[in-house]
Amino acid sequence: MDNSTAIAALGALAQTTRLETFRLLVRHEPDGIPAGELARLIDVPQNTMSAHLATLSRAGLVTSERQSRSIIYRADLSGLRELTLFLLKDCCGGSTELCAPLIAELTPCCAPETKLS
């Protein structure tokens, strides 16, 4: 990822409705949410939601797929991963001990569930 791509992604998230939309899509992975349902859940007009989704899509943060008459939107987790890695690439000048607390904070939210025997 380069600076301009990161700036586009951060800029797309730097607006309340788009940030709420993206976070909602992340919570609904991997199923996604139809565009109309997103508009209803966020309480914005459908045409406004379409504009926000287009911005998020251009920034590489959401994907869409037509299913019958609906368009299902999903968070693009690879785009989120690239942005996060871009931001953390030079974390603390490579000092592992300084980055460890940050990595530890990120791990619990994404750790796979273990199955009990």
Image (tube, helix red, strand yellow):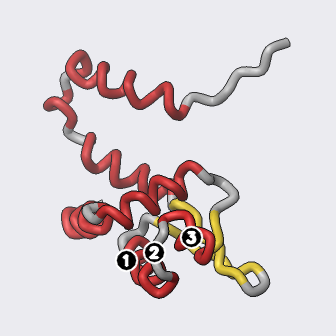
State the quadrant of the C terminus.
top right
Q: Position of residue 66 (x, y in %)?
A: 69, 81
- Asked if residue 81 is positioned above or below residue 73 in the image, the reply reads above
Alpha carbon distance from label 2 to label 3: 7 Å
Mark 2 — residue?
44
**Tag shown at residue 40:** 3
The reply, left or right, for residue 3 in relation to residue 20 is: left
How far is the residue under mark 1 from the one under mark 3? 19 Å
Q: Residue at x 62, y 53 (%)?
A: 29
User: Secondary structure beneath disc 3?
Assistant: helix
The secondary structure type at the circle numbered 2 is loop
Amino acid beneath label 2: Val
Nearer-the-camera pick, 98 or 13? 13
Query: In which image quadrant can residue 31 be found?
Result: bottom right
Under circle 1, the secondary element is helix
The residue type indicated by label 1 comes to Thr
Vertical order, 101 against 76 (above or below): above
Toward the left, the furthest residue is 93
Task: State the residue at coordinates (36%, 27%).
Answer: 103
Q: Would residue 103 appear left or right of 25 to someone viewing this image? A: left
Residue, disc 1: 55
Residue visible at 50% across and 32% down in the picture: 109
Of residues 73 and 15, the one nearer the viewer is: 15
* Total count of labels: 3
For residue 111, above or below residue 13: above
Nearer-N-terminus badge (1/2): 2
